[in-house]
Amino acid sequence: MSAAQFGAGRLGDVLWPASGIALGALLLWGYSVWPGIAAGAFLLASLSPLPHRAAAVYAAGTTLAALLAAFLLRRIAKFDHSLSHLRDALGLVVLGAFGSSVVSASIGVSALYAAHIRGWSGFGSAWLIYWLGDSTGVLLITPVMLTFPDLLRIRSWFRIPEFVAGLFLLTVVCFIIFGDLPLIPIRLHILAFAVLPFVIGAAIRFGVSGAGLATLLIALIATIETAFGSGPFATNTPLMNAVLLDVFFGVVSVTGLTLAAVCEERERAEREREQLAREQAAMEARLRLATIVESSDDAIISKDLDGVIVSRNAAAQHIFAFTEAEAVGQPITILIPPELWDEENKILQRLRAGGRIEHLETIRVAKTGKRVDVSLTISPIKDAAGRVVGASKIARDITERKRADEALRKSEERFQLATQAGRMFAYEWDATTDVVGRSAESAQILGINEAAH
């Protein structure tokens, strides 16, 4: 942590990544890394003309600002590392960047002037540069640290080339705008904002991580080219160039962060709306199914693979007379005559194998002991992984049909007997021959082989 803090602090006065690294480390790994932040800041200050006492004050201010920012973000803003909410993006901008940098700038610049490194007459401009640099460091570095793992999780073969091509094109445009190329002979500050569409596109397509990385790339190229006297921000005094660069970086960074957060909130709201619609449709389907089940005249009973009743509809109580409290949790054998328990075991074995039973006519027994003729259709119930976890049984009471079938059978038997009895003494007359003969049944009873004339 100290090495990162020290190395980042040496990058320059315009872009101070050390403040962003410090806050990012605290948010990612907790308050326990503060000694590394303090050591890195002290080492950086020791390389300047500051006395050791002033360097210690400078390091304390840098560390305190980062700790304060992390504390405020966690306690007040309820900060989420993903920066996927507008609240998180604005919290990082207001509390993490602009707010905490007031502390570091005030303590750091005071240490410089207390050590008589500079005259107090330039305190205001020095404070502004310090504050802008720290704020810019947080805006550019911290979002990339917090969300860079999101870029590593890109799995689409289409989006990876899209991202790489976008960064390459942005790099070319940055060198055209900020470099000393003859393509743009004039140097206007407004030209720098030609890179803004790339940041907007990265925010829409790749979220906070894409917008943060694009903004950081712009800042690095612009800072280096301006340091070499190229680009639209190299036309003023070094102090004014630094101020203009920091303001430009702040505008681009805040635009990218907030737009990405809004886009992700919109996408999340759309996903939640779709999920809610699916859940509502599923609930309506379940309600329709429950209505169908409850209004069915057939008994519908669900059971687990151990044969224990899990649920039943109202028709089951009407047919078998068991209430819900009496049936649920009891073995299904309370509805089966003892001599048919083996039949139930075979049914359970078939269900465990994923099979189903259709239109099995058998007998079940009611609470009163009354036997009920039923036609069973039994289907396996599967979980999301496709494993059989239970069975749904539809039992149709066919007692009346059985009675009707039996009555029809007996009626047909009686009809056949009556027909046979009527033919015993029946005679047949042939009108063409004027011959009268007995029926075969009558001749058989009387012992006559041929009919008489």
Image (cartoon, rainbow, N blue to C red):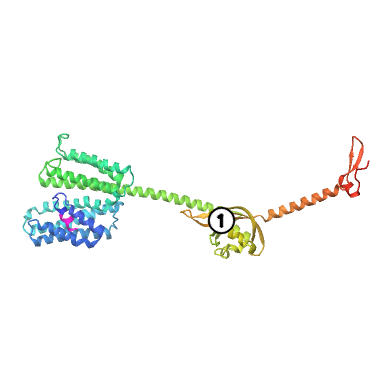
Q: For this view, does 60 lie left or right of residue 203? A: left
The location of residue 366, given as percent across then percent down, is 64, 62
Q: Relative to 203, is 293 above or below? A: below
The outermost residue toward the right is 453
Check disc 1 and report the residue beneath it: 350
Of the 4 image quadrants, the one containing the C terminus is top right
Residue type of the residue flagged with mark 1? Arg
Q: Nearer the viewer, residue 94 or 333?
A: 333
Q: Relative to 304, is 273 above or below? A: above
Q: For this view, does 22 lie left or right of residue 443? A: left
> Magenta residues, as a range?
1-6
Q: Nearer the viewer, residue 437 or 186?
A: 437
- Give the residue drawn at x 38%, y 48%: 270
Q: Nearer the viewer, residue 417 or 269?
A: 417
The location of residue 263, given as percent across then percent down, is 32, 47
> Which is the main secondary structure of the residues drawn in magenta?
helix
Q: For this view, does 282 lie left or right of residue 378? A: left
Q: Is residue 215 magenta?
A: no
The location of residue 414, given as percent across then percent down, is 79, 52
Q: Secondary structure at mark 1?
A: helix
Judge whether residue 40 can be spotted in this image.
Answer: yes
The location of residue 401, given as percent across then percent down, is 68, 53
